[in-house]
Amino acid sequence: RIEKDPSVIDDVIKNIDSEIRSIRFNSILVLGELGEKSASALSNIIECLEDDDWSICREAVRSLGKMGNLAEKGIIKLSKLIGNEEDSIRKEIATTIGKIGIAGDEALSALRTFLKDKNEDVRKEAAKALGNIGPSAHTIIPDLMLSLKDTSWPVRTAAAQAISKIGEGTIKAIPTLIDALNDKDWRVRYRVVNTLAKIGREAVPSLLKSLKNKNPTTRKETIETLGEMQISDPIIIDNLSKMLGDSIEFVRGKAADALRSKGRIL
């Protein structure tokens, strides 16, 4: 119907001011579903961030996220809600900032604060949002390095993935990432391996040192990282070959797998 008659959007906007909560809520929801087509309602949705009803406020946050970078004007207002007592609102703010994808000072400051939030879902969404923003969020790499030591494994996993997506400035995170190869959760280790492999050649010197780590799990994950890299440097091959003599069977097995991945027939 909206394709044939865009004026329908104006009717929906008018309902945002309804005294009936369900009408306000559904009006915001519909405008959010329309995404960029509801650009004319942007200021109205931003005003709803101040609604006394927390569910209306949260739906307004979600709708801004569905409008993408058109909702940049709402970031300042969103950043003022970082202290909201409702966990789900803080979580949605983090998600929405990531969807808007613009790394202004207010956005990065809000996400930096959310990385330390008391709620692990908020912390996780903040890390994911920084990854979605990408290279322009590189100034937050030190904060994500701290998140690699978070008590929650989903947060640690999201932090590792965010560092991978940001790309720029990730060299400084290499030592912390290598420490995380010893994470107690395999899902975190898996993501860290992928992140280090993506960093590539810059991570090789530190990874070669890590092959001598006393912890066999760290050695195994280090070998897997080197195997994942699309690099067939003779130094890497030589060091992987030496790991075939490791005292731990699963480490030797991983070394054999890594060498095969690089075309070495054993």
Image (cartoon, rainbow, N blue to C red):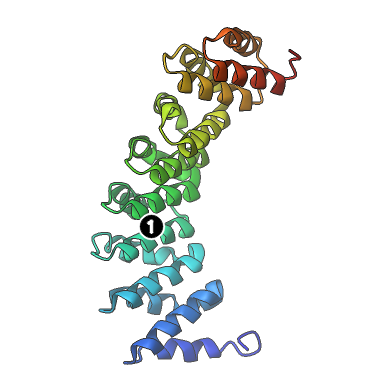
In the figure, 4 relative to 208: above or below? below
Q: Residues within 10 Å of mark 1 (few under 14, many from 20)?
A: many
210 horizontally vs 88: left or right: right
Residue 120 in sight in this render: yes
Q: Residue 81's x, y, as percent?
A: 27, 64
Q: Residue at x 40, y 33 (%)?
A: 184
Quarter of the image with the N terminus is: bottom right
In the picture as drawn, the residue positioned furthest to the front comes out as 249
104 horizontally vs 205: left or right: left
Q: Which residue is mark 1?
A: 94
Tag count in the figure?
1
Judge by depth and name the residue closer to the eye, 181 or 54.
Answer: 181
The quadrant holding residue 102 is: bottom left
Quarter of the image with the C terminus is: top right
Q: Residue at x 53, y 31 (%)?
A: 193
Q: Residue at x 61, y 90 (%)?
A: 5
Judge by depth and name the residue closer to the eye, 94 or 254.
Answer: 254
Label 1: which secondary element? helix
84 horizontally vs 111: left or right: left
Q: Residue 175's x, y, as percent?
A: 41, 23
Judge by depth and name the residue closer to the eye, 144 or 190.
Answer: 190
Q: Residue 159's x, y, as percent?
A: 42, 41
What type is the residue that disc 1 sits on? Ala
In the figure, 94 relative to 7: above or below? above
Q: Residue 260's x, y, as percent?
A: 71, 20
Q: Residue at x 48, y 35 (%)?
A: 186
In the figure, 117 relative to 88: above or below? above
